Amino acid sequence: MIQVEHLQKSYKSSRGFWGRSRQDVLTDVSFHLNDGDCLGIVGESGSGKSTLSRILLGLEAYDGGSIRIDGLPHHKWIKQNKGKFSVVFQDYRTSVNPNWTIRQIVEEPLRMLHGGEQKQKQTSNESLIAELMERVQLPMEYLDKYPHELSGGQLQRICIARALTTRPRYLILDEAISSLDVSVQSQILTLLKELQADFQLTYLFIAHDLQAVAYLCNRLAFLRDGVILEELDCNHYTCAKSEYVNQLVSSVLPFESGFTRTREGLTS
Ligand SMILES: Nc1ncnc2c1ncn2[C@@H]1O[C@H](COP(=O)(O)OP(=O)(O)OP(=O)(O)O)[C@@H](O)[C@H]1O
Ligand SMILES: [Mg+2]
């Protein structure tokens, strides 16, 4: 279980006197993530969603507050659980090396994790990669291709396979479907739902699309002005207290989607 309490993060800003002021991005962010959860994080562009992801992945330091995983301080847990926190980014083209084969791309986290021992693990890696290629529904021949030979949806499937090679427990999906066209988005959402069950994953799903969030997530948090403005159970959108959240939720209601299951409550 992940517990985030009063998290703060600011960046140096070029604005202000002598350009020395700081921009507060996260001022007081608190939430928890239970094992097996899919928590959706929704927020306007620039609200700090990716900053929060980088902090959770251990790629960036935070200024205040605390993060604990299974009761351990975040940095300690990350050190003891290499590869157990993984990520899929929005921009699948720039998140892969265009000069590498798909095999090299998928194997990269294993090389980073096992380093010199890599050779001895070759056989087990091969079966793991075959399993992952099957799970993301791509033939093994694709391993010899290069990124430019794949469609957007195929390449994002490869990024998902790559994120799973280290058998993570937590997977951050940072706008992972936003750059795909609508029909591919729904295929990837279905795949993510299956993978969550099969690999017992806990997701942090960052998205702008409330309908996608409603389909995949069981809880939803709205990030605004540096805080979690409100957290909702995905089956009870009606319970939103803030005007901002109510407006966002109502704006997607006319569409058919995963929201169907929440509509009853909303229209009653
Ligand atoms: N390394 C950095 N240095 C300075 N400022 C940064 C840095 N990274 C992010 N920021 C600033 O922090 C704020 C939040 O950025 P972030 O990328 O986390 O937003 P976001 O919610 O992910 O936005 P989007 O929905 O557009 O992806 C932005 O104003 C951004 O300019
Ligand atoms: Mg972002």
Image: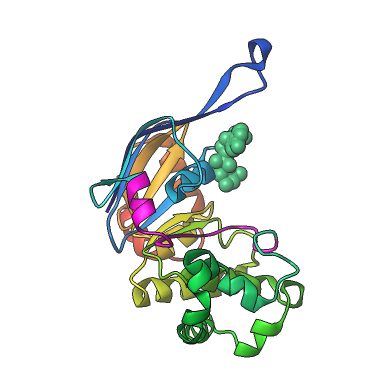
- Left or right of residue 116, residue 180 in this image: right
The residue sitting at the front extreme is 116
- Tell me which corner region of the image, top left, top right, bottom left or bottom right, holds residue 228: top left
- Left or right of residue 44, residue 80 in this image: left
Of the pair 239 and 200, the residue shown nearer to us: 200
Q: Residue 258 location, x and y as percent?
A: 43, 65
Which color mode does the image show? rainbow
Q: Is residue 10 magenta?
A: no
Q: Residue 67 location, x and y as percent?
A: 33, 42
244, above or below 41, in the image:
above
- Tell me which corner region of the image, top left, top right, bottom left or bottom right, holds residue 7: top left
- Left or right of residue 194, residue 106 in this image: right
- The residue that appears at 33% across and 51% down in the rendered structure is 77
The residue sitting at the top extreme is 17
Q: Is residue 83 magenta?
A: yes
How many tags in the picture?
0
Q: Quadrant of the C terminus?
A: bottom left
- Left or right of residue 23, residue 73 in this image: left
Of the pair 141 and 122, the residue shown nearer to us: 122
191, above or below 223, in the image:
below
**Could one spot residue 187 in this view of the protein?**
yes
194, above or below 130, in the image:
above
- The residue that appears at 44% across and 35% down in the rendered structure is 62
Q: Residue 194 location, x and y as percent?
A: 41, 76
Of the pair 65 and 81, the residue shown nearer to us: 81
**Could one spot residue 43 in this view of the protein?**
no
Residue span colored magenta: 75-93
